[in-house]
Structures are given as structure tokens and as C-alpha cells.
């Protein structure tokens, strides 16, 4: 029988982070990091003054903390507070990237941390890229495993993976940029783990995007403390007696290995073309394919088959606000059948007052199907004239197996950024993001995020 060292997982994590600046990543991995940055920047701009973000900006302003880290479309402050505001903004619309194996939304906590610390210390862009990759790889392995894995199990227990393992991803980013050794890198992760939380009950409120910003803030704080000698629980990442046992107490979970040399989890990242919970996307995409066929005809009944997990995070049956509608498969299907694109501008309270939505919602039945792929959906529409229409999606657009192309991410970025900072500045910011890693691109991004045309 093989003996496992007491802190074997923790030591593996600490070593990986400590060595992260020496690793050489394939071009496709660095390109994927830039894709995540393009997505991140567009969302940070459009939501910089979202109602979810405004109270945070006011609070940070009152605290008057000094620093060089940029608050998007604002001034500068200490990295932890800039990351709090920016990370919350990026997740405000639920339009940001997603790790399809369950770790949540890596871009908001990891890029917020990398940019804030990089700006504060004038870091080399290649170091910032390497730190971002390290943070995503740590976050994804700690929260991955697909349906039986950690992230999905956290959701079933009522916890938001982005909030829980996002803290650890952010701590890894910060520790990498600080150049912490393996021992202090593990302490940074442990300090982050002991602050972890974030409730699925917050979905549909300001609390959910706050999870992403707070994960970034706490990750930076955890690494700052570790750099000063703060000692965390080294055993916190083991399979017994650590954070997993605290959150998933029945141990009904398959924990993925810390196989950092086997593959890149960043390549399993996905990007959203709908501004709603990932669990609504397959159903919405499928329903959109039926719009022309039902136009002008009376709908009698709509049946939607989904993976059971869709109802864990997006099971609201009677949303009362545009924000709640993002977490309702039924409402997103009603919107799609009514011709809405499910853009960020569609998720407003006025949409729920649309007579078409109000008429369709009671007629939509959601059927969870055990064994069905989370990336798939099947929609059947029964019409009053007796016709029955059927449509299916096997793999949602935006999934790593059906990725959004670079051109699609560019189009999304332009739609978000151009109305905020203008075409010229948006072009310059997009160019800096696609070339990030070259000298001067971090400073260029900082200048453009001031919002001055």
C-alpha cells in the first residue's frame, strides 16, 4: 500500500506556484489567456458603473487607500480594493468566462488580481501572463472534476465555486507575482481557504458578482499576509480534515488530481454569448432556433429537457427582476422564443413585463434528465394549431468543444466597449489585449482604462 505524505497535495500546490514564473507555456495557452483578457476588459468597461458596482466604488472612495492599481473608469487605489471593484464589475452581468468542468468563472478573480498587482509593482507583462495562467490552473484543479467533481458538488451543497476556489486562484496569482517560495505560496492558499464562502442563495442578487470581486480581494490579502510571514493551515488541501471536508461533509465528491504537468485547464475555458447563467445557455440557444417557425402562432406548451444541474443554479420559475431572470431557464427560453438575443441589455425589469414573456412563462415545463450532457438541451413546442416543433443542441456555442472564435470575442468586446470609451480607444485597448505580453501593453491598458478619450 502506497503511503501518502501528510501534506502531499499542499506541497504540490506550493511547488507549482513557486515554480510558475519559470514555466514555459505553449503559444496556444498564452493565446487563451489573451482571449480571457479580451473578454474581461469589455465586461469591466460596460459594467464599471453598474448598480452592482456603484456601492463598492463609493465605499472604496471613502476608504481613501492609496495605490497604483486602476479601478476601471476611475482612479487608482491599493490592489486588493481595485480587484474587489473590477472583479465584481466583470461578473455583474453573468456574461464572463466559465470553466466548463465546474470551477466557476476564472477571469474575474484571476485577471483582476494579475492586473492590479502588475500595475502596483510595474511588473513585466510576461510575469503577469504567467501568474494568470498559474491562478487559473490552481483554481480549475481545486474546483474541477465535472458533474461529480468539486465545483458542481459545491453548487449542490449551496456554495458558489467562483467564490470558494476563486479565492485560491487569486491567491496563486498574487503569490506567483510576489515570487513567494513553496512554503509561503501554500500559506497564501491556506489563508485564502480559511476565508472561503459564497452562497448559491445569492444568485439573482448583487451578492453573486460580489463573490468574484471578494475572491480577488481576499486572494491578494492572503498572499500579502503570507509574504509577511503569516502562517496558514498546511493540511487544508488534503483529502481529509481540510476545506473539502468542511464544505462537502458527506464526501460525495470525486476530487480531481493535481496533475499540473498533464494538461492545461485554461484550454477548457469557455466564453458566453448570452448574458445569463451558463446553465440557461443550451436551452436558450435551442429555443432561438425555433423563433421563425413560431412567429405569429399561438404556443400551447413548451417542454425543455435539461441536465439536472441546470435547476440547481437556474431553477427560478417566477423571476421578478431582470437580474433574477438570468437564473431562470424558463424565463430565458421565453425570452429566446420571443425574439430576444439575451444580450446584457435584455435583462431588465421591463422585459419581464413584455406580454409575450408573461404569456409564455406558465406554459414552459422544465424536465431534468439524469445523464444528459450539461452542454445540451432539447426543446419541444406544441402549437395551438396542432403542430409540434422540436429542436436540440448537443454542445452549446461557447463550450470548449464548440468554442467562440477570436472574431466572436472581438465582436463581443466591441459591442461592450465602444459605447463606453469610443471606437478609437476601444481599438487601442483591443490591440493591447491581443498583444499582451509585449513590453508596454500593461501600461497602455492602464491608460485606456482611465476612460479618457
Image: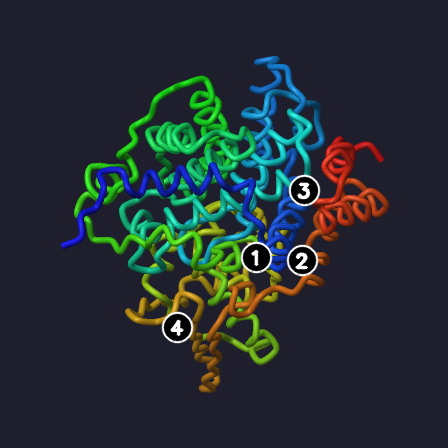
Kindly report the distance in space between the C-alpha atoms of the residues bearing marks 2 and 3. Answer: 15 Å
Q: Residue at x 42, y 43 (%)?
A: 203
Query: Which labelled disc corresponds to residue 46?
Result: 3
Q: List the residue tagged with mark 1.
A: 271
Q: In this rendering, which labeled residue sits more in front, label 2 or label 4?
A: 2
Would you say the residues marked 1 and 3 are in contact, meaning their CB atoms lie under 8 Å apart? no
Q: In this rendering, which labeled residue sits more in front, label 2 or label 3?
A: 2
Kindly report the distance in space between the C-alpha atoms of the residues bearing marks 1 and 4. Answer: 27 Å
Would you say the residues marked 2 and 1 are in contact, meaning their CB atoms lie under 8 Å apart? yes
Residue 220 location in percent, x, y? 50, 28
Q: Residue at x 19, y 43 (%)?
A: 249
Q: List the residue tagged with mark 2.
A: 409
Q: 385 or 63, which lies in front? A: 63
Q: 437 or 160, which lies in front? A: 437
Q: Earlier in the sequence, mark 2 or mark 1?
A: 1
Image quadrant where one finds the N terminus: bottom left
Q: List the residue tagged with mark 4.
A: 303
Kindly report the distance in space between the C-alpha atoms of the residues bearing marks 4 and 3. Answer: 35 Å
Residue 347 location in percent, x, y? 57, 50
Amino acid at each position: 500500500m502506497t503511503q501518502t505524505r501528510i501534506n502531499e497535495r499542499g506541497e504540490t500546490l506550493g511547488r507549482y506556484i513557486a515554480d510558475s514564473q519559470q514555466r514555459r507555456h505553449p503559444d496556444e495557452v498564452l493565446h487563451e489567456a489573451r482571449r480571457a483578457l479580451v473578454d474581461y476588459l469589455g465586461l469591466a468597461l460596460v459594467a464599471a458603473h453598474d448598480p452592482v458596482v456603484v456601492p463598492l466604488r463609493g465605499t472604496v472612495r471613502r476608504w481613501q487607500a492609496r495605490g497604483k492599481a486602476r479601478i476601471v473608469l476611475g482612479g487608482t487605489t491599493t490592489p486588493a480594493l481595485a480587484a474587489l471593484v473590477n472583479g465584481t464589475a466583470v461578473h455583474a452581468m453573468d456574461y464572463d468566462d466559465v470553466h466548463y468542468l465546474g470551477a466557476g468563472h476564472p477571469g474575474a478573480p484571476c485577471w483582476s488580481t494579475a492586473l492590479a498587482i502588475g500595475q502596483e509593482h510595474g511588473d513585466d507583462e510576461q510575469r503577469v501572463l504567467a501568474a494568470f495562467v498559474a491562478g487559473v490552473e490552481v483554481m480549475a484543479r481545486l474546483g474541477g472534476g465535472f458533474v461529480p467533481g468539486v465545483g458542481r458538488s459545491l453548487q449542490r451543497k449551496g456554495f458558489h465555486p467562483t467564490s470558494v476556489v476563486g479565492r485560491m486562484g487569486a491567491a496563486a496569482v498574487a503569490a506567483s507575482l510576489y515570487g513567494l517560495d513553496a512554503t509561503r505560496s501554500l500559506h497564501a492558499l491556506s489563508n485564502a481557504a480559511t476565508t472561503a464562502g459564497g452562497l448559491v442563495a445569492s444568485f439573482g442578487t448583487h451578492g453573486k458578482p460580489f463573490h468574484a470581486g471578494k475572491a480577488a480581494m481576499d486572494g491578494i490579502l492572503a498572499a500579502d499576509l503570507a509574504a509577511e510571514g503569516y502562517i496558514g493551515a498546511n493540511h487544508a488541501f488534503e483529502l481529509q480534515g481540510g476545506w473539502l471536508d468542511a464544505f462537502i461533509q458527506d464526501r460525495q465528491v470525486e476530487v480531481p488530481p493535481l496533475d499540473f504537468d498533464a494538461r492545461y485547464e485554461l484550454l477548457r475555458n469557455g466564453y458566453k454569448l448570452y448574458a445569463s447563467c451558463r446553465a440557461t445557455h443550451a436551452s436558450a440557444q435551442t429555443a432561438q432556433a425555433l423563433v421563425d417557425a413560431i412567429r405569429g402562432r399561438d404556443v400551447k406548451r413548451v417542454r425543455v429537457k435539461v441536465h439536472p444541474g441546470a435547476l440547481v443554479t437556474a431553477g427560478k420559475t417566477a423571476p421578478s427582476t431582470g437580474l433574477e431572470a438570468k437564473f431562470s431557464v424558463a424565463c430565458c427560453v421565453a425570452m429566446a422564443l420571443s425574439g430576444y438575443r439575451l444580450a446584457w441589455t435584455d435583462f431588465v425589469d421591463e422585459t419581464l413585463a413584455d406580454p409575450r414573456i408573461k404569456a409564455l412563462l406558465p406554459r414552459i415545463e422544465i424536465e431534468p434528465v439524469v445523464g444528459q450532457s450539461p452542454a445540451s438541451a432539447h426543446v419541444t413546442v406544441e402549437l395551438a394549431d396542432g403542430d409540434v416543433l422540436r429542436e436540440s443542441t448537443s454542445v452549446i456555442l461557447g463550450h470548449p468543444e464548440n468554442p467562440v472564435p477570436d472574431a466572436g470575442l472581438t465582436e463581443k468586446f466591441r459591442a461592450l466597449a465602444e459605447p463606453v470609451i469610443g471606437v478609437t480607444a476601444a481599438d487601442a485597448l483591443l490591440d493591447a489585449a491581443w498583444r499582451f505580453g509585449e513590453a508596454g501593453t500593461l501600461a497602455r491598458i492602464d491608460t485606456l482604462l482611465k476612460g479618457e478619450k
